[in-house]
Each structure stands twice: as C-alpha cells, then as structure tokens.
Amino acid sequence: MVRGSAEDGPHPVDRHVGRRVCEKRIALGYNQSDLGRALGLTFQQIQKYEKGANRISASKLWDIARFFKVDIGYFFEGLTTPQPGMAEGEGEAFVHDFPTTRQSIEIGRLAPQLSVRQQKLILDMMREMAGHESPADKG
C-alpha cells in the first residue's frame, strides 16, 4: 500500500504508535532526553518518533518496549482494523487524536479514585470548558 504524497503527513499508524510511546514515557516519568540516552538517540529523534514524523523501526520499537517493560503489542493497543466492506480511512480509526500531556495522563490516573458522582461532576465541567454538549443535552 502506498502512503501517499508528502502533503498527507505522517501515517496514522505511525502517529498512533508514537503517541503510545509518548504516553508511556510520560506515565513512567521519563523525558525525551532520558529515553533518547537509553536508546542511543537524541531527544530530537524521540520527538520525531512521538509525532509520527519518523517511523520507528521494528528493532527500535523492540528496544523501547524492553526499556518500558511492556509487550510490543502495547504500542498498537487502541488501533482498529477496518470492518469488511469498509473503505480504508472510513469510520473512526483511533481512540483519540490530541497531544498527550502530563496533565491528561494525571487526569486519567486520578479519575478512578473519585466516586461516580464526582466523576460525573468533573466530566460535566470538562465538557463545558471544552465546549462539548453532554449526551443528556442532545436528546
């Protein structure tokens, strides 16, 4: 399969894998320089991997998985396969398409510690701040 023109930008799978590397790196408390040193790379190369601008080779992904102590499949979790009869790129291929931050990871880590009532309140507040309607507002 041909990737397309350079104007298309990074392949969605490369972006997804890069995002998973970034999420895990942040969750473990490493910065890009730490990961780069462990792999014999510069932080700029790690940055390119995380954005999906540069593809991660199989051997380098293996090294990253070993450094993070995760199965290599971790980096592909959340990736969906097109359903039979569905054209490539049709439907929602990825769980999210936003930059991962330390704050978003911490929000995800703390949320389960709240009661369901507190989670609903926080979710309503976040929806309002983001300008999204809650499902109850739509119907």
Image (cartoon, rainbow, N blue to C red):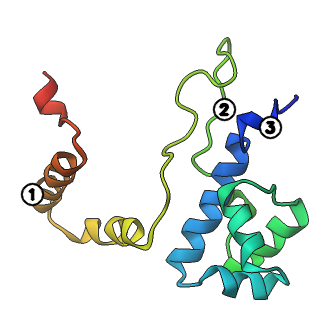
Residue at horizontal 82 percent and vertical 81 percent from the top = 39
Kindly identify which residue carries mark 2. 81
Vertical placement of 87 versus 3: above or below?
Answer: above
**Marks 2 and 3, how far apart at CA:** 24 Å
Q: Residue at x 16, y 46 (%)?
A: 128
**Horizontal and vertical percent position of residue 118:** 11, 62
Closest to the observer: 8 or 3? Answer: 8
Q: Earlier in the sequence, mark 3 or mark 1?
A: 3
Residue 96 appears in the picture as rendered: yes
Q: Could you tell me if the residues under marks 2 and 3 are in contact, i.e. CB atoms within 8 Å?
A: no
Could you tell me the amino acid type at mark 1? Arg
Q: Please identify the quadrant where the N terminus is shown.
A: top right
Q: Which residue is mark 1?
A: 117
Tell me which numbered mark, 1 or 2, is placed earlier along the sequence. 2
What's under tag 3, amino acid-wise?
Answer: Ala
For the C terminus, the image quarter is top left
20 vs 48, nearest the viewer: 48
**Residue drawn 21% across and 46% down?**
127
Q: Secondary structure at mark 2?
A: loop
Does residue 83 sit above or below 54 in this rendering? above
Image-based side of 39 in relation to 88, left or right? right
In this rendering, the answer to whether 1 lies above or below 131 is above
Judged by depth in the image, the label closer to the viewer, 3 or 1, is 3
Disc 3 and disc 1: Cα gap in Å?
47 Å
Q: How crowded is the residue under tag 1: few (<14 C-alpha within 10 Å), some, or many (20+)?
A: few
Residue 65 in view: no
Disc ID at residue 6: 3
Counting other residues with Cα less than 10 Å from the Cα at mark 2, is it few (<14), some (14-19), or many (20 or more)?
A: few
Residue at the extreme top of the image, as rendered: 85
Label 2 vs label 3, nearer the camera: 3
